[in-house]
Amino acid sequence: MKRNGKISNAVIRRLPRYLRILEELSSQDVQRISSRDLSEKTGYTASQIRQDLNHFGGFGQQGYGYNVNDLREEIEKILGLTREYRLVIVGCGRLGRAIANFNYTYNQGFPVIGMFDVNPEIIGKTINDIPVADVRTLPEFLKQNSVDIGVICVTKEAAEGVADILIKGKVQGIWNFAPWDVEEAEGIPVENVHLSDGLQALIYYINHNEA
Amino acid sequence: MKRNGKISNAVIRRLPRYLRILEELSSQDVQRISSRDLSEKTGYTASQIRQDLNHFGGFGQQGYGYNVNDLREEIEKILGLTREYRLVIVGCGRLGRAIANFNYTYNQGFPVIGMFDVNPEIIGKTINDIPVADVRTLPEFLKQNSVDIGVICVTKEAAEGVADILIKGKVQGIWNFAPWDVEEAEGIPVENVHLSDGLQALIYYINHNEA
């Protein structure tokens, strides 16, 4: 995805990691952090960090470091985490439930407002207080409700069809967990998650482990 | 993780994506692909692709492109996907079940040989033919069985404790889904998966969408 001439995708991808660490520091009442300490915690070099954070104005002060709360708030603003995003989850098998649960437990600010499935045995059941609806009612649901993000947790084969419905229903973004790359269409950004990519990288490191 | 002086982590991270596309092409009986077509499918530039693949010897031929099967096999070899990796999953809530299921459906070559939990209501149940055992039996299980990868699907709070058991049990790598960075110890590589990182990047793109 290339949507911004100024900030590279690589930098965007590093921001959530900074944010996680700053949140952790903030919860421990740490007020300042040096780029060297941030380097140790992130694994990025101190010069990389200074370069990254300079994109967003000069937070750091020589010999003083970064103000944890200011930097955290600034990254939240840049990412757009200052408002709620309403999600629907399509596909309520184990993965869909896991995502629903994850959001319920850890991700405040991302309420799941609808869950959908094709399976009559699952339709009507309740997951974290949300009843699972028939996927055939999804287009109407998208008309009636303002949905920000559609989460695809269906099989590889069904993914493209679900993406079409979400795009027609004018969601703002798609978070896809099916092992099939959903292509961007009509300018709607898609985040394709491939769990096995991380596993394969891990296997590379196992096989090239010199420890 | 920095374990190889020659191949950068960034390249390693791109290999699974190449592999996915090559597998897809291979299943469609496509025999050759140009770096330009690979560029279209991956989103990487053609020159990036040539550079990446040159790390592993000169597969490409000017005006001919890459041999899909050769390149696929080579990437599999580099990653180490030419043998099986035996997994145990610790934490059999929705996420652990989803990973078990995902591996069962899509990830041949990664048999789950043990599942563990603390919850007496889950212990003894069977998930994809594997009975869930008491996590207190995990150290003994690791002694008796050769386990390649430990998958952590427990809560944030329990993650570090589980990682300790896995490390003492001499797994070769850890695939961690708890929202808490497990630190590498005793040279055992760790892949920390943060589902919300992708969601946050998606939200950035939603907010900077110029379409």
Image (spheres, coloured by chain):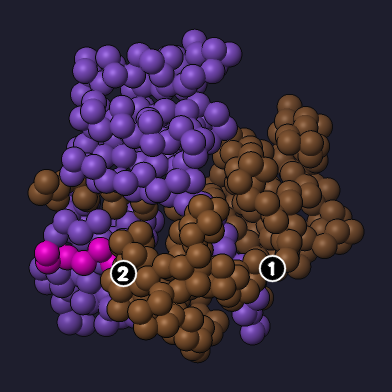
Chain colours: A brown, B purple
Q: Residue at (49%, 60%) from the top-left corner? A: A30
Marks 1/2 in contact by CB < 8 Å: the verdict is no
> Which label was assigned to residue A82?
1
Q: Position of residue A109 (x, y in %)?
A: 70, 56
Please state if A211 lies on the left or on the right of B43 as rendered.
Answer: left
Measured along the vertical axis of the image, is residue A34 above or below residue B18? below
User: Amino acid under label 2?
Assistant: Arg
Measured along the vertical axis of the image, is residue A7 above or below residue B166? below
* The stretch drawn in magenta includes residue A178: no
User: Amino acid under label 1?
Assistant: Thr
Q: Residue at (62%, 74%) from the top-left corner? A: A77
The magenta segment is: B5-10
Q: Chain of mark 1?
A: A
Q: Position of residue A168 (x, y in %)?
A: 75, 66
Q: Residue at (60%, 43%) from the top-left corner? A: A102
Q: Position of residue B38 (x, y in %)?
A: 34, 72
Few, some or many C-alpha atoms within 10 Å of disc 1 (few <14, some 14-19, many ≥20)? few
Disc 1 to disc 2, how far (Cα)?
Answer: 28 Å
Q: Position of residue A36 (x, y in %)?
A: 31, 69
Residue at disc 2, secondary structure: helix
Q: Chain of mark 2?
A: A
